[in-house]
Amino acid sequence: MSALVLALIAGAVVGLALGALGGGGSVLAVPVLIYLLGFTPAAATTASLLIVTATSLTALYAHARAGHVRWRAGAAFAAAGVLPAALAGAAAARLPQTVLTAAFAVIAALAAARMLRPATTGSGAGNRRTHPGKAAGTGAGLGALTGLLGVGGGFLAVPALVTVLAFEMQAAVGTSLLVITVNSLASLATRSGAAVTLDWAVIGPFTGAAILGAWDGRRLADKVSGPRLQRVFALVLLAVAAFMLADTLT
């Protein structure tokens, strides 16, 4: 199968995940870029940030039109992650490739485990008081993760917004896309001068397919049970994480 066809298929899956779940697609983009499309880990994390930024902006627009984005709270949450994302993005260029790959595999496995757990709903949570320090700390942690591993952090942002800021699920999914976009842009800003060769003939089609997939994902979220989509994606992600970890350790 040609690199172009692989990029189009993978991009569509990444876009579907981001559009339907508000995150998760980016943690598939990195292993696909490394193992199927021949990118180095450093190039894959940078390319993933480019793909995630463009796709998240598209999905954010779709969710904003539906009124599922809480701009003020989302902007404050994202702002806490800007500096950590930038610092971690600069540090990532100095880490060994095997360390990045192993760290990514561990985070992907944790994300899959978190997605397989029963979802926490936002109903009845509105009476809880949100601790500003906890919200800022969570936002900073997501920013650092984005900068270091090239993932948007949506698979962690959605449950964080539900449990820390007491968002209902639809608002958490839409607002997480704002957080992803801001963190990804901050990390990309620090990587712009890094000596990483990017294959734009692959990244372009990958991004285009992801953007189209994000629109379909937004519609899919209205038709298919969110927990069902999340379970299927989590199982795929768990298998990918196991493969990456085994490959790193052997």
Image: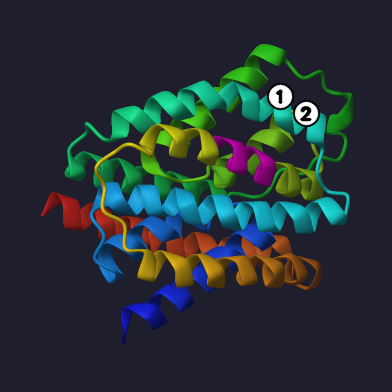
* Of the pair 107 and 188, the residue shown nearer to us: 188
Q: Marks 1 and 2, how far apart in space?
A: 5 Å
At x 72% / y 49%, what residue is drawn? 173
At x 71% / y 14%, what residue is drawn? 132
At x 51% / y 33%, what residue is drawn? 186
At x 63% / y 71%, what residue is drawn? 212
Q: Say which element carries label 1.
A: helix
* Of the pair 30 and 138, the residue shown nearer to us: 30
**Which three-letter amino acid code belongs to the residue tagged 2?**
Ala
* Of the pair 61 and 152, the residue shown nearer to us: 61
Quadrant of residue 131 within the rendered picture: top right
Q: How is the image coloured?
A: rainbow
Extreme-left residue of the structure: 250
Q: Is residue 30 left or right of residue 61?
A: left
Above or below, comparing residue 131 to residue 16 in the picture:
above
Labels 1 and 2 touching (C-beta < 8 A)? yes
Quadrant of residue 198 within the rendered picture: bottom left
* Of the pair 201 and 4, the residue shown nearer to us: 201
Task: Assess whether residue 126 is covered by the magenta stretch.
Answer: no
Q: Position of residue 111 (x, y in %)?
A: 48, 47
Q: Is residue 136 left or right of residue 25?
A: right
**Disc number at residue 76?**
1
Say which quadrant the C terminus sits in: bottom left
Please state the extent of the stretch shown in magenta in the rendering.
176-183
**Disc number at residue 35?**
none
Q: Position of residue 239 (x, y in %)?
A: 37, 63
Q: Say which element carries label 2.
A: helix
